[in-house]
Amino acid sequence: MKRLFLLFTFLLSFAQMRADEGMWLLMLIKRLNGVDMQKEGLHLTPEEIYSVNNSSMKDAIVSFGGFCTGEIVSNQGLLFTNHHCGYGAIAAASTPEKDYLKNGFWAMKQKDEFNSKDLYVRFLVRMDDATQRITSKLNNKMTGEERKAVIDAETKAIQAENSENGKYTVVVRDFFNGNEFYYFVYQDYKDIRLVGAPPSSLGKFGGDTDNWEWPRHTADFTVFRVYADAAGNPAEYSPSNVPLKPKHFLPVSLKGIKPGDFSMIMGYPGRTNRYLTSYGIQQMVSKDYPAWVEASKLAMDVMKKYMDKDKGTQLNYASQYASVANYWKNRQGTIDAVIKNGTITDKQGLEAKFKQWAVQPANIAEYETVLDDIAIYYKQTSDRNVERNYASLLTRNAKYFSIALQLGSVLKSYAEQDMQGRLAMKPKVEAAVKSAYEKININLEGEMMNSMVGLYQSKVNKDVASPTIMGLDSKNLSNVAYSSIFANKTSVTNFILNPDRLKLDADPLLKIANGIVADQKASSERYSKIDDNFAKNNRLFLAGLMKAIPEKKFYPDANSTMRLTYGSVDTLPIREDRNYFGVTDNYYTDMTGLVGKYKKGDEEFDLPQRVIDLYNMKDFGQYADAKGYMPVNFLSNNDITGGNSGSPVIDGDGNLIGIAFDGNSEALSGDIVFEPEWQKTINVDVRFVLWTIDKYAGARRLIDELQLVRDENTPADTKTRAAKPDHVKTTGKKKK
């Protein structure tokens, strides 16, 4: 009965919600008949969006690398995602001599498309409900370990039942704070090749200044292709592989958009905390995120110091720097938005309703103390949670620790082998060493370690701190690393030639790294009962809240599973402190604004001369809006978060109209609470994507394999091929 009540509440709340809020599981579309999505402008059936037995829209959407989303846009496996999603792959392929980040890359022939090492895409095959199966074996009297053991056992069984002997990857996820469970069956493709990328002056136009801001003028897209074996099955990279023939791909619309037009986004949102209590939000904005912001800024400063000195270092650390900078601005923006929007007060109002319901006779035994216990938890763990943030940024950015741990394990096994065993292991060991040091700046890493450890020591309460970290000499720690087996590739190679287990065990850097891991484990054990009780109270709070406020809109938090969000193209109020470059209907930007922001030689606002020349000639071709301007970005009110980067924005007929790439600063509290007035998604207009591919880059062959959708207002396709720009990179060879 409890399960049925939760489902009824879920469906009822969906029927009462606004169309632009919520990240919805696809298999529930048919059951969500309380909302007529067709009245909002959708012309597709639920079966056309999600089907197990027939091709459907879900078959064109992929998890890109496990951290972004991508969409298949041709019958030859062509894939669009964001430039910042492909950033790591582009940087990895770049060298100071062939700088694809700076100059862009375009494969003018299929043979020029090259493999992006370690990149994969994941297709959803099907999903199903495992709630009854798992929750029937759980109860609130279980310890955290007992509960985990049951869930792990059922997960293992579900994976065995559905993987078809390894053909599929099966993932089980909990929803609504552990009150429900679903499993997802995926198929992974590992031969992913880079096809095209605009230069960073387009793909990252605006840099950190414009990040999370509107108006935007960014060509945030990259083009890849999925390859398979001759039978269409996943395969490791091979020259004999062929472009994938997908079950479904998205047609591309040239019709244009206007406010109120239906927009749907499908993708893999990473993590939201919409049901976080006011106590959790207070801890986040007053303690946790300030720690994250401070540590991120320090890491950025260290990287920037060395990146500015050396082109190779700049390329090698570009992806890491961009990621840290993105989170740095996001966390600070979240703090500001929570305070400005009164998020904590709103949450307290919701919790007051829960408390009134919880003290009713039928509920008091199970729910009366839940919120009080949650409040106590944050008091007990406040300093520990701050420590976790500083420790997380330390271990993420100070790579010497992770290198020592990673290679230490490998070298230990190697040293324990006899001569024959070492010969067998040697290629694997050498490959691991090459990977670890391939793009490392030793001086940068030494300073990073000193700086991050020094910050940790100055900010973390000693009662919860790692004894290992607190005992280090942060001013001279780099010297310890430089004297270690793990100092550089040469020193590790020397150890491989003369392995000595005793020397490895005595290595000072490895001792420190192992000590940090041991301290983290001890901290987890120290707080395990407190954390288990908190998880239980979180489950009870959300289950009770759904009963207490049945008119409230409830939907599962994002957890890196495929979701659908729908709404419409929408506007933001004009702000006096912004330049809109003549745009008065504030839902789009155009090339007038792009060129208007241009600053020659500026790291964030420079532009290729070709873009300026094409703009001056008004050479927009079939990609111009019916009103004559060249669109760049647009806004919709879809509900997205990190992981949705690269997601397709789809119209009511199932056509691609844009690629989602950002949110806006006014609503950076969006992972905690949806702000209907302010929360928007910033998208690249697909017409600007195609203009960049065709007119700017001259890669018309890619346009020719798309299914373009036009109407009477679409400019005529003159089929004029843009001349190939001198700077465009194809095979990576210098132009003769």
Image (cartoon, grey):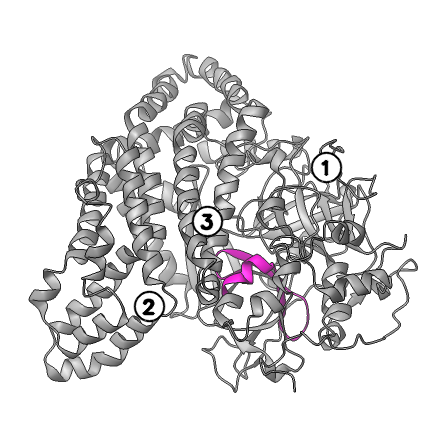
Drawn side of residue 301 relative to residue 664, left or right: left
Q: Within 10 Å of the Cα at label 1, are there few (<14), some (14-19), or many (20+) other Cα atoms? A: few
Residue bearing mark 3: 324
> Residue 537's image quarter?
top left
Label 2 to label 1, Cα distance in Å? 44 Å
x%, y% of residue 260?
A: 79, 41
Give yes or no for residue 638 being in the magenta stretch: no
Query: Which residue sits furthest right?
Result: 712
- Specify the amino acid type for callout 1: Arg
Q: Position of residue 336 (x, y in %)?
A: 54, 30
Q: Dot 3 surroundings within 10 Å: few (below 14), some, or many (20 or more)?
A: many
Instruction: Identify which residue, 649 or 154, lies in the foreground.
Output: 649
Helix, strand, or loop for circle 2? helix
Residue wearing tag 2: 437
Please tell me which of labels 3 and 1 falls first in the chain.
Answer: 3
Q: Measured along the vertical axis of the image, is residue 569 above or below residue 624?
A: above
Disc 2 marks a residue whose amino acid type is: Tyr
How far, Cα to Cα, is label 2 from label 3? 21 Å
Q: Secondary structure at mark 3?
A: helix
As drawn, 126 above or below 96 = above
Badge 1 marks a residue whose secondary structure is: loop
Is 84 in the magenta? yes
Alpha carbon distance from label 3 to label 1 = 26 Å
Q: Nearer the viewer, residue 261 or 552?
A: 261
Q: Which residue is mark 1?
A: 578
Residue 445 can be seen, yes or no: yes
Q: Quadrant of residue 719?
A: bottom right
Looking at the rendered image, the quarter that the C terminus falls into is bottom right
Which residue: 22% across, 51% down? 477
Q: Amino acid at mark 3?
A: Val
* Segment tinted magenta in the rendering: 63-88
